[in-house]
Image (spheres, grey):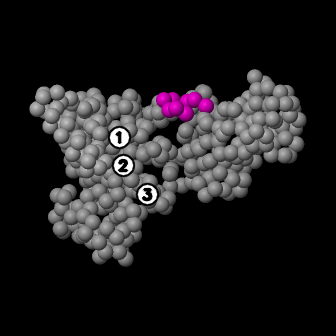
Amino acid sequence: MAEPIITVENLGKRYLLSHAVRPDTLRDTLTHGARGLLRRWSGTAAARQEEFWALRDVAFTIGRGEVVGIIGRNGAGKSTLLKILSRITEPTTGRVKLRGRIASLLEVGTGFHPELSGRENIFLNGAILGLTRAEIRARFDEIVEFAGVDRFLEMPVKHYSSGMYVRLAFSVAAHLEPEILIVDEVLAVGDLAFQKKCIGKMQAVARGEGRTVLFVSHNLPIIRQLCTRALLLDSGRVTFQGATGDALAAYAHGLDDARPLRVPAPTPEQQLEGFVTALWLETSAGRPLVSARVGESWRARVHVTAAVPLAQFVIALSALNSEGVVVQTCWSAPLDLAAGAHEVVFTQDSVALAADSYKLVLGLSVAGRGLQQFEAARLEISAEDPLIPCAAPSGYGLVLNSMQVSHTRL
């Protein structure tokens, strides 16, 4: 590992949760206040607080120039960790050693004064980072050009849209040359074009300029593309740290999605004929799948119940890109299903989809008549270079029957 720039030892953060009932009316306020005084005088006041550890026994080291992703469920402790690293809040236990200046982008408007203009906030942030006015001026034009807010530079930032706020905040954080750049999920506020610019800038900051980036996101393809290493948090503890691919696999394996994905309840008409009862998205090794890389293999396992024998039964799986366009579809050969349970498996040996976020839609039909259709799942596809989409083999058109389909009676 390169020279350590962040060292975290036995880190913990505790909060006290109050379970006191808040009075709704003046009468209730007076009543509860009187009861509280009586309890204090009688010595019977009971503490109605509960300890909650947002972080516990967290330890890791990050080297200079690394790009590290931090992943986990909502409530896992990711934002709390970043606030401690950014010195916004103090830890309850343990310590953090930082060897360099930090710029943080944790939420919309971080570090900005709403009454100051965009220009004034650029100089304010630079001063907070310890730069002179001459150093800030030298980077000023580049910051404004990257953010694309030159027309609104003299306007107080309280009038900015959330997208403008994020663009300027990220541009300031990335161009004022901190040794450590910390970015939370806030980039999701920006549009797709700006997200790609940010990814490219973070790559340049880390690889070309040797600075360290910590990145929190639920967008797993971006984590895979951007980060060389990842930490997996669960219930305030680091449950895995290592190569990004291994961390994402550990994350997917621990998700509730390891169980069958939810499917809609059948209508009374579908109950009389046929309907989907369960669905799994998996890797070729049978692990739960939420993200795949272009060229990897994956499969969808679908369980179907036929209430009666069904002739010329067809099941289709389609992928819609982030713009809602169907770019891939595959269907089974017409099947004659006996009454009972069946499994249909769609397998793709090499992902033929471009890097994007996809909706997977399942459809059932009998003799050309539709039985059931619904959005079955979402699948994130990533590529080696996030800035260059990997086109499907057939170009920009629709890919047909690029998956193998097998059928088994259960």
Circle 3 sits on which residue? 189
Q: Which quarter shows the N terminus?
A: top left
Residue at mark 1: 78
Please name the residue shown 24% across and 29% down the image.
Answer: 10
Q: Of the residues shown, which amino acid type is indicated by label 3? A: Val
**Residue 152 makes an appearance in the image:** yes
State whether residue 307 is above or below residue 384: above
What range is drawn magenta here? 253-260
Sequence-wise, the earlier of marks 2 and 1 is 1
Q: Which quarter of the rendered picture does the C terminus lie within? A: top right
Q: Quadrant of residue 76?
A: top left
Judge by depth and name the residue closer to the eye, 32 or 51.
32
- The residue under label 1 is which amino acid type? Lys
Residue 235 occupies quadrant: top left
- Which element type, helix, strand or loop, lies under badge 1? helix
**Disc 2 designates what residue?**
184
Regarding residue 230, the answer to whether it shows in the image is no
In the displayed structure, 361 sits above or below 56; it is below
Q: Nearer the viewer, residue 301 or 2?
A: 301
Residue 286: x and y, percent? 60, 27
